[in-house]
Image (tube, rainbow, N blue to C red):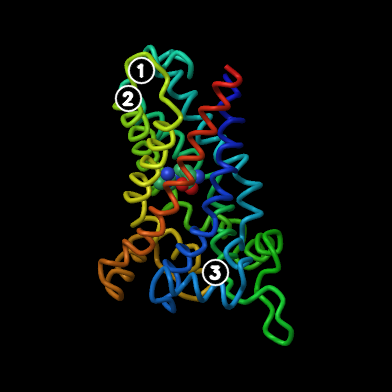
Amino acid sequence: MPVEEFVAGWISGALGLVLGHPFDTVKVRLQTQSTYRGIIDCTVKTYRHESILGFFKGMSFPIASIAVVNSVLFGVYSNALLALTATSHHERRLQPPSYTHVFIAGCTGGFLQAYCLAPFDLIKVRLQNQTEPRARHGGPPPRYRGPVHCAASIFQEEGPRGLFRGAWALTLRDTPTLGIYFVSYEWLCRQATPDGQNPSSTTVLVAGGFAGITSWVTATPLDVIKSRMQMAGLERREYQGLLDCMVSSARQEGLGVFFRGLTINSARAFPVNAVTFLSYEYLLHLWG
Ligand SMILES: CN(C)C(=N)NCCC[C@H](N)C(=O)O
């Protein structure tokens, strides 16, 4: 089993993550809290209340976890394509796999990464939703002191299953949308590249960016539900399950609720995924 794809997936994921985390914090807050009027309001309030550090809350854990998550995604994707088409990463420009194979391999990568991602994503969302500034004398201390304290508290208060809160919504979000992610990337690269040649860096950047946007646009409705289910244990607002969360959110806030965070998700997706694909392709080319 080729391992370079796993390592390249890890490094490229970490680069994308640092770039996209401030956007991600604004997105999570818009999706789960109703105190903000929009992206600008949320950005200004976060900055005034918590300084620039507020945008980077909950980042240390994803940086550590991206090693597992992105390497599982890209490693499983590439190895699933190898199993389906008997071609390695370098042979795929001369013998391009069918879009059906790309989709199946992407869904497989998405399905497996979702379960690795679930506890890390839960902790990230809980920390991002802590709006108390880190060090304010006299004010109430934040509920969680950091990622390890957050994981331990969830474990104590909600049991081991608590760490997988929202995992089902996350799996439903990621399985098809990662198929869409890789198909969009491949399709855009092939449109802009003569047969048998490697795509240029600009093509990879643009195709990666648009693949990110396409997949996040389709993922946003379940992303909202996932984030709400992850916060439910904390806010004493329990849902009976995924369907209940969908129905009660739509009843209380209208269908527009499923598109909360769509603009910021798309704005974040372009640079993050452009950088992720460019560094992934570059590293594999370097080691090739
Ligand atoms: C729609 N979904 C779930 C994805 N496209 N997932 C792939 C993640 C890529 C990158 N780390 C990001 O956070 O955008």
Please give the label number shown on residue 96: 1
Contact (CB < 8 A) between labels 2 and 1? yes
Residue matched to label 3: 129
Mark 2 residue element? helix
Contact (CB < 8 A) between labels 1 and 3? no
Please, what is the three-letter code of the amino acid marked with disc 2? Arg
Q: CA distance from mark 1 to mark 3?
A: 43 Å
Residue matched to label 2: 190
Q: Closer to the observer: label 2 or label 1?
A: 2
Task: Decide which of tag 2 and tag 1 comes sooner along the chain.
Answer: 1
The image quadrant that residue 12 belongs to is top right
Please, what is the three-letter code of the amino acid marked with disc 1? Pro
Mark 3 residue element? loop
Whole-percent x and y of residue 145? 70, 68
Residue 110 in sight: yes
Q: CA distance from mark 2 to mark 1?
A: 9 Å
Residue 114 in sight: no
Please, what is the three-letter code of the amino acid marked with disc 3? Asn
The image quadrant that residue 60 belongs to is bottom right
Q: Residue at x 56, y 48 (%)?
A: 17
The image quadrant that residue 185 belongs to is top left
The quadrant of the rendering that contains the C terminus is top right
Residue 274 versus residue 37 in the image, above or below? above
Crowd around label 3: few <14 · some 14–19 · many ≥20 (10 Å): many
Whole-percent x and y of residue 113? 51, 40
The quadrant of the rendering that contains the N terminus is top right
Q: Residue at x 42, y 46 (%)?
A: 270
